[in-house]
Image: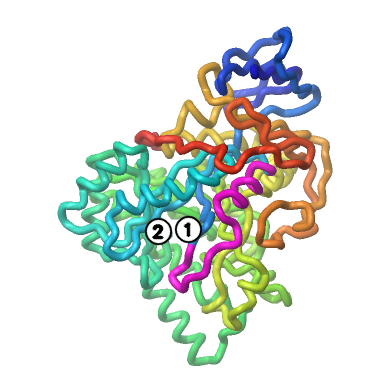
Amino acid sequence: MDLLVRGGTIVNETGQQKADVLVQNGKIIRLSDCILPVPGMRVIDAHGMLVLPGVIDVHTHYGMVSAGGNRTADDFFQGSASAACGGVTTIIDYAEPLPGESLLEAANKRRQEAEGSIAIDFSLHMVIPRFREGQAAELKALLDQGISSCKVFTTYKSLKIDVPDLLRLLKSARDLGVLVTVHAEDDDVIQRAQRRLHEGGMLAPRYHPASRPVEAEVQAIKWLVSAAAAQRCPLYFVHVSSGEGCRAIGQARQEGMRVMGETCPHYLLLTQEKYQSPEAQQYIMSPPLRRQEDIDALWAGLSSGALQVVATDHCSYTREQKQAAATCLDTLPGIPGSETLLPLMYSEGVGKGRITLGELVGLLAGNPARIFGLYPQKGVLAPGSDADMVILDPYQEVTISAQHLHSAAGYTPFEGWQVKGYPVTTILRGRVIYSDGRFSGAQGGGAFIPAGPGTFQ
């Protein structure tokens, strides 16, 4: 059935226009001042509303199994349904090879797992814990199948890539046009910090910030910037948590280095004081929450272009899973976030004058699509693009509560947060999958979107 969205304010990075949107066969056909409906056409009245490109959350962990065998509360269906209720129409999750498994085998297995249940569109990053001589052919095979980005870790025993492997990967990625993304925390700094905590018996959840200090993030970013520059390879830093780390990326960009960065709503809105509360374990993620001055610097980094993307690192565990361990070192790290990404960023960013409406679209849709090779199929409202839209009521006031959210985690780190501006309708390739508080999508209704080489931003 054809779809017509009438009377809304269309918002792209480049500006706004009052226009109708005509959709046929899942694609945007036309944007015009007045499009008349025809019999059989579904019409959505968007007068007084903002019509934005569907949000792209480029950092999620749905149905993830940790090294200790713990599975996240949200599988591909539950996580994507929750995301859809917050205006997210595309996510990029991770494929991680098991020991002895090739990169391509791991990617195919993960893709099949998602395709059977995911409710929104998706792509994949490839986790690469080691990269031996001759593996460039595997990287090329991934690229041919539409996986154009990978992720490396500089910490965690089971995931940490060693320096020779990293340098080989950077060279191969540069030659092929694969984007390397990095979880940047210096493992030596973390190990020293955690030894001191062990020796002092300081292992309660409130010591989480001390177990992964800012110094670990900053040292890793600076070293990686230097290594990538020597290889002439673009680099993308995930979940930047500190002002100093953000400034290091911004400085590198000013010097002409091809680096990009992402932060998350929790690093923009919550401080490490949360670790002093009785619910401290619910706020444990890696890296930890930081100080107010870090929050201020991250917002400044979004406005200045030091950081290009806001994503969630959605990695949900239930309260029971989080509280199964007693220490900051053993608590499962991760929080839910996909469903609250847009309302928080609109209310706290646009609503408080920290970013413009165009910048919001860039951070949540346009930049993610370009950087990860999905543009212009995704990330923009334009003829020929997928009809992925979120209709947002800029005046609707909502108190965020787990009771009304759709994640299986059963809690939100933003419980009680007041927001003004909330998504009321989510449209995926011309199909309404969320409207007026009710998810109406289908399990398995999402599709794998092959990614091409991204564009440096």
> Residue at label 2?
221
Seen in the picture, residue 418 relative to 218 is either above or below; the reply is above
> Residue at label 1?
245
Q: Earlier in the sequence, mark 1 or mark 2?
A: 2
Residue drawn where x is 57% and y is 37% of the image: 445
Residue drawn where x is 76% and y is 24% of the image: 46
Q: Nearer the viewer, residue 352 or 413?
A: 413
Within-10-Å neighbours for mark 1: few <14, some 14–19, many 20+: many
Q: Are marks 1 and 2 in contact (CB under 8 Å)?
A: yes
Q: Amino acid at mark 2?
A: Ile
> Where is residue 190 shown, x and y percent of the image?
43, 75
Determine which quarter of the picture holds residue 45.
Answer: top right
SS state under label 2: helix
Q: Say which quadrant the N terminus sits in.
A: top right
> Where is residue 152 shown, x and y percent of the image?
36, 57
Which region is colored magenta? 65-85
Please check the rendered image and state whether residue 372 is part of the magenta-colored stretch, yes or no.
Answer: no
Seen in the picture, residue 374 relative to 162 is either above or below; the reply is above
